[in-house]
Image (cartoon, helix red, strand yellow):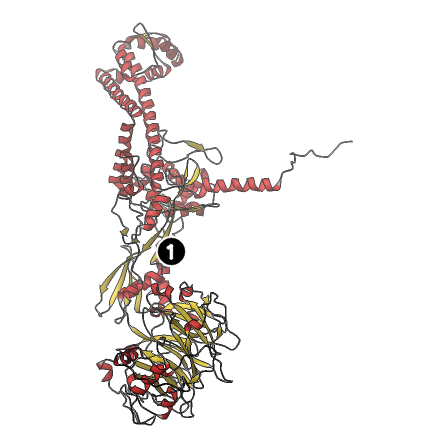
């Protein structure tokens, strides 16, 4: 019976899966690092680029030869050296032919090889290629035993391990690649500067990196542009890592239409021009960049030209700064100078790279010289044999004639001893030890015997014999030179230097990238003019900024003007006057805080609606901005100041202002509030200040800021600031200066500054004077049941007058008054407060209560977007328990929703005399 069971073809061995995975992964990682992604520091090439260049040399695609189809080159390289996809080979070839990718192109391409707009190259069957002259310098002397060779993937061919590289290609053309666990990103540099740095090292191997940077300051990109500052370059040169800030080159042109245009003629390295133009268009449509009227790309084969037309009322420098800040026209190049050195990936600084290249070139020149020395000696050895044969020509001819075949003739020539004549001197000259010399006789070697048998009769003439002698002398000189080079390192360095300078003379071009020595660009704020702005927010969540100058001043009792177009259900809720450089904190209904400079808010005309806040801040669903607070422009003051919060339910909290210094674009938690509560005010305050909380029912409370401890947490809802009656809520919070007076002094001062006659609420117009009524007398006595009357000295009266503040209170029906802050006594926090203003049916509820300066102005806004600017000194000074006077005549159903104090000095002659200005109405 036959056993049909087949024997196993191979033995199965158990392995540890963890060890096997580790070994396999490491093998794969090293294969990617060494054989694919990381360039060699010696020639600056990855294997695919090296194989393409060598394959083109083998194929006869020299710079002085006709172009060949790229498909032919790709197929030849793929079949012989690089058994990967044809697209990988073609992409690598294309990059070496792109003038915007390579500082010194290695492939001379004919056809469409792509563009800076990201356009793909034509298919390889349509394009043609050949080596450039610069590539020949990388391949020169490759056949002179200058580099090691290895078998290709199937052992059928030999390929070079590295190219001889006559210049530091790794610095000139840079490299980029991602391996396993590491990556490289080496920028391009100027060939002339790189060679100067190499020569500096040859002169002084101990040269410092700072000294090298005097001739090689930084990268030089093929697309030109500008490098901002030396810090990134310095870090890259010293450590091998750094971030180099690149910026497009821009020029300003005056157009026939009277506008200015920004012309970009160079863009940062590796930036897609078409996508950048699209990005600018998107930013203009989103109104993140304002002031651009037209945008077009006029680039052609002669160079880059992107035109940005600026509106007549815009500042071109500001638009340019915004383009740099928001588009890839300013970007960074992350330098990571990782390369293979002796087969090991290493992060190198600039000196390490130069040292490695010089050592490699020293090896190349040594091996080349030894190779040439061997060739010269071999030739001299043959010439010695020919010289002896010519000297013994008759006997040589006889031996040849007597031999039956060439092999016998060669053996006979080698067996005999021949008269050397004057050849012994030649032997000594060329240091040839191949011949056996005995008693003035010489025996031929096999190489000499073969050369004699192949000798043509024409070489036997006297002239040819002289040529042999001349060639012998030349060879002797060459051999002596080669030996001196091999024996003298200084001489070898001299050759190295000469070859580097020859490459510089042949290929160096002027620097394209300008390096601005300033550490960084000017802040965009430096280019934006300081201008007072009115910031308005609607209940629907829209915001805008408008130049304050667009609102003309009116007298008290005017009808105002429209501030924006609003929908029926959308009313204006917030108004703030600041300048363009002021940082503003925006607080949301969920207790988040965001920070933005005023100039970054959307600019709109007085009657426009603005931009939705959800498109400016990352607000979550249901979240809205409830209040905002301007900060001091001088950030050095923030550490000594506090921020004070007040909510509608009467809670207050104090934090260090420095807690809100660093606020990311995504926002930051500011305060935690109970359900139904909201922020009504956030102010910057000092340790000696007082807080004034005003309720909508007409009561208010004043207490020292230091009654509220400084909270370290931002998630607390604080402590009670004011006890509110049912249905009442805090509508306004202000910060006042501390009162350094006694009750008696305040009473005496208020009594002294009153006018004796009584006036009705509507019958008194101020110009800074006070009116007297029964309510004022009563308010002066609120501090104590019995106040002792005193007489103030003139000096003390003047001190109190200088420190006096006035509280402006405005109601929803457009009425208001000013009262001395001395009438608001200081109590402990948490009380019910005192009367602030009478909230009669005529007045309505309180909208705001805040300190003012009689030389300034106020701006009122209604829920129908009507705005009025009114001088403060036209508003009557009255006691706390009064009704006030008309500030804005509201229409039926119209309510005042916001009051803001304007800076002193905003009323100009032009605004006072503006046409259509309303007059005071009785």
In the depicted structure, whether residue 589 falls above or below residue 757: above
Counting from the top left corner in percent of width and height, residue 295 is at: 31, 65
Position of residue 759 relative to residue 340, above or below, is below
* Residue 624 drawn above or below residue 268: below
- The residue sitting at 26% across, 15% down in the picture is 460
What is the x, y in percent for residue 823? 37, 83
Near-viewer residue (559 or 176) = 559
Residue at 44% in and 70% down = 654
Residue 651: horizontal and vertical position, in percent?
A: 48, 75
Whole-percent x and y of residue 239?
Answer: 37, 44
According to the picture, the residue beneath numbered tag 1 turns out to be 118
Q: Nearer the viewer, residue 293 or 769?
A: 769
* Residues packed near mark 1 inside 10 Å, few (<14), some (14 to 19) or many (20 plus): few
Label 1 residue SS: loop
Can residue 593 be seen in the rendering of this structure? Answer: yes
Work out which quarter of the rendered image holds the N terminus and state it.
Answer: top right
> Which of the pair 81/898 is nearer the observer?
898
Residue 447 shown left or right of residue 831 in the figure: left
Q: How many marks?
A: 1
Above or below, 291 against 889 in this view is above
Query: Is residue 565 in view from this perspective?
Result: no
């Amino acid at each position: 019976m036959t056993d049909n069971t087949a024997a196993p073809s191979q033995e199965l061995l158990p392995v540890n899966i963890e060890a096997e995975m580790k070994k396999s992964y490491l093998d794969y990682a090293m294969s990617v690092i060494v054989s694919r992604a990381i360039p060699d520091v010696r020639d600056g090439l990855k294997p695919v680029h090296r194989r393409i260049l060598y394959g083109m040399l083998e194929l006869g695609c020299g710079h002085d030869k006709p172009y060949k189809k790229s498909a032919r080159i790709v197929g030849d390289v793929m079949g012989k050296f690089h058994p990967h996809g044809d697209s990988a080979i073609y992409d690598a070839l294309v990059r070496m032919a792109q003038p915007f990718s390579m500082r010194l192109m290695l492939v001379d391409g004919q056809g469409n090889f792509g563009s800076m707009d990201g356009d793909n190259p034509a298919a390889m069957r349509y394009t043609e290629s050949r080596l450039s002259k610069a590539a020949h310098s990388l391949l020169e002397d490759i056949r002179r035993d200058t580099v090691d060779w290895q078998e290709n993937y199937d052992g059928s061919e030999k390929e070079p391990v590295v190219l001889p590289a006559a210049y530091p290609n790794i610095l000139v053309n840079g490299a980029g690649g991602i391996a396993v666990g590491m990556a490289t990103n080496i920028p391009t540099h100027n060939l002339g500067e790189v060679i100067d740095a190499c020569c500096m090292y040859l002169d002084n191997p101990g040269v410092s990196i700072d000294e090298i940077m005097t001739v090689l300051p930084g990268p030089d990109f093929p697309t030109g542009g500008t490098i901002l500052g030396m810090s990134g370059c310095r870090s890259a040169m010293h450590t091998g890592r750094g971030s180099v800030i690149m910026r497009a080159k821009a020029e300003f042109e005056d157009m026939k239409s009277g506008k200015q245009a920004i012309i970009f003629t160079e863009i940062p390295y590796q930036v897609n021009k078409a996508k950048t133009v699209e990005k600018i268009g998107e930013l203009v449509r989103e109104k993140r960049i304002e002031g651009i009227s037209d945008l077009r790309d006029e680039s052609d084969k002669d160079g880059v030209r992107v035109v940005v037309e600026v509106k007549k009322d815009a500042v071109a420098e500001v638009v340019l700064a915004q383009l740099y800040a928001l588009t890839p026209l300013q970007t960074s190049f992350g330098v990571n100078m990782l390369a293979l050195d002796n087969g090991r990936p290493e992060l190198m600084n600039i000196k390490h790279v130069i040292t490695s290249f010089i050592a490699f070139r020293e090896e190349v020149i040594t091996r080349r010289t030894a190779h040439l020395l061997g060739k010269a000696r071999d030739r001299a050895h043959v010439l010695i044999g020919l010289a002896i044969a010519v000297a013994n020509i008759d006997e040589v001819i006889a031996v040849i004639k007597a031999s039956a075949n060439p092999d016998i003739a060669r053996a006979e020539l080698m067996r005999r001893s021949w008269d050397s004549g004057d050849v012994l001197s030649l032997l000594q000259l060329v240091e040839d030890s191949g011949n056996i010399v005995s008693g003035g006789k010489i025996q031929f070697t096999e190489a000499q015997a073969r050369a004699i048998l192949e000798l043509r009769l024409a070489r036997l003439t006297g002239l040819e014999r002289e040529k042999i002698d001349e060639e012998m002398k030349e060879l002797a000189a060459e051999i002596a030179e080669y030996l001196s080079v091999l024996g003298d390192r200084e001489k070898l360095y001299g050759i190295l230097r000469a070859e580097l300078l020859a490459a510089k003379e042949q290929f160096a071009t002027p620097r394209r990238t300008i390096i601005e020595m300033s550490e960084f660009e000017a802040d965009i704020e430096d280019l934006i003019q300081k201008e007072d702005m009115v910031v308005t927010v609607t209940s629907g969540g829209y915001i805008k900024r408008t130049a304050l100058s667009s609102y003309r001043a009116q007298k008290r009792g005017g009808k105002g003007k429209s501030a924006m177009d609003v929908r029926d259900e959308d009313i204006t809720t917030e108004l703030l006057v600041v300048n363009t450089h002021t940082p503003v904190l925006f607080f949301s209904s969920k207790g988040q805080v965001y920070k933005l400079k005023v100039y970054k808010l959307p600019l709109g005309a007085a009657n426009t609606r603005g931009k939705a806040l959800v498109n400016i801040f990352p607000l979550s669903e249901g979240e809205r901005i409830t209040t905002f607070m301007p900060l001091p422009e001088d950030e050095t003051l923030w550490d000594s100041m506090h921020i004070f919060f007040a909510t509608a339910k009467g809670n207050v909290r104090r934090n260090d202002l420095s807690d809100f210094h660093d606020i990311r674009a995504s926002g930051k938690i500011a305060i935690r509030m109970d359900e139904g509560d909201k922020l009504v005010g956030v102010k910057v305050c000092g340790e000696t200040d007082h807080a004034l909380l005003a309720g909508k029912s007409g009561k208010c409370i004043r207490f020292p800021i230091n009654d509220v401890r400084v909270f370290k947490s931002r998630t607390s809802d604080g402590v009670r600031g004011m006890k509110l009656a049912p249905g009442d809520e805090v509508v306004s919070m202000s910060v006042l200066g501390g009162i350094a007076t006694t009750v008696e002094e305040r009473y005496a001062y208020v009594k002294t500054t009153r006018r004796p006659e009584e006036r009705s609420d509507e019958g008194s117009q101020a110009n800074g004077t006070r009116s007297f009524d029964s309510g004022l007398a009563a308010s002066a006595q609120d501090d104590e049941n019995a106040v002792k009357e005193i007489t103030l000295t003139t000096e003390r009266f003047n001190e109190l007058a200088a420190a006096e503040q006035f509280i402006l209170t405005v109601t929803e029906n457009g009425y208001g008054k000013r009262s001395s802050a001395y009438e608001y006594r200081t109590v402990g926090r948490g009380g019910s407060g005192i009367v602030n203003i009478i909230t009669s049916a005529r007045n309505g509820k309180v909208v705001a209560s805040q300190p003012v300066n009689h030389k300034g102005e106020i701006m009122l806004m209604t829920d129908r977007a009507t705005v009025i600017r009114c001088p403060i000194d036209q508003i009557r000074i009255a006691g706390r328990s009064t009704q006030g006077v008309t500030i804005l005549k509201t229409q039926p159903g119209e309510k005042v929703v916001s009051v803001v104090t304007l800076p002193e000095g905003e009323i100009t002659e032009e605004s006072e005399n503006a046409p259509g200005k309303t007059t005071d109405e009785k």
